[in-house]
Image (cartoon, rainbow, N blue to C red):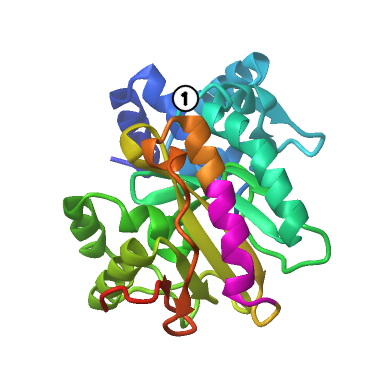
Amino acid sequence: MTVLADRSAESHRLTSAQRVLSILGVFDAENLALSLSEISRRSGLTLSTTHRLLNELRCWGALIRHSDGKYSIGLRILELGTLAPQGGRLREIALPYLHDLQHALRANIHLGVPDGHDVIYVESLRARDTVPVPSRQGGRWPLHATGTGLVLLAYAPQEFQEELLASELRSYTAKTLTDPDELRRFLAEVRRSGVAVVESQLTYGVMAVAVPIRGPRDKVVAAVGVTVPSGSASPHALIPAMTTTARSISRALGAPSAGAPAPRPHWRVHEATRPLTPPGARR
């Protein structure tokens, strides 16, 4: 059987919905615009099937076709994304507080929610004249590779943590936390301190600080993070405003603990790439 016949047989085994999803799934941060042949190759569908589905998706608004013949995601997908209850309502509630936080810190601000082994940024505010970062609204990164992701992982169920730690963890820099034992220690300290601080975890020369956001029943549902150039600010200078922001968002989401008086904030840095630990906390 030829390669073309193999691909044709495979495509016939897919449902119509699976074919559409396989086309939408070929787009990512590194492949924002793709040609017909590229989409066909990456999706595993025949050229004729790909061409037909691309036209249907374009007419519906899920894709747009550029003058050079390449396709990219259309605004209809963004419109649907804002309706997701996990991110849409959270973003709507959090956005005013995030703008205030960015104005106060003049830093990149990220609001992330968990999705499987990844964190998805439902909002990403870029500050002027600061460190460039690859994050963007709708961006997806492994939980272990970002400050926000590490916070979400720290408060995830133990079974989920072990499942992720047993998987292959990608290194983005020499400082990316990928050793399971080191990650376990790091996550335990994040739970004790309520803060994750990492240096050059995803991008060299960047410090990331993140804190949890809680919802009903005090479950951690999201994380807010900031990124600044390494050495440009002390975590001590960033954390009070961040915890205040997270607390305000948590209160708006109905977190019971967010309505109680805030504890007096005291932290100290354990190591340059470690979370902050409150005085007197067990180590």
User: Residue 12, relative to residue 110: is it above or below?
Assistant: above
The residue beneath circle 1 is 85
Residue nearest the viewer, comparing 197 with 253: 253
User: Residue 27, relative to residue 279: is it above or below?
Assistant: above
What residue is at 20 percent from the left and 63 percent from the top? Answer: 166
Left or right, residue 30 beside residue 152: right
As helix, strand or loop, the secondary structure at mark 1 comes to: loop
User: Residue 172, relative to residue 99: is it above or below?
Assistant: below
Residue nearest the viewer, comparing 268 with 90: 268
Give the image location of residue 238, x and y in percent.
Answer: 62, 66
Give the image location of residue 140, x and y in percent.
Answer: 50, 49
Give the image location of residue 35, x and y in percent.
Answer: 65, 40
Give the image location of residue 102, x and y in percent.
Answer: 72, 53
The amino acid pointed to by label 1 is Pro
Q: Residues within 10 Å of mark 1 (few under 14, many from 20)?
A: few
Residue nearest the viewer, comparing 265 with 213: 265
Magenta run includes residue 32: no
Left or right, residue 122 beside residue 6: right
Give, as a single range, the part of the protein colored magenta: 233-246
Chief SS of the magenta region? helix
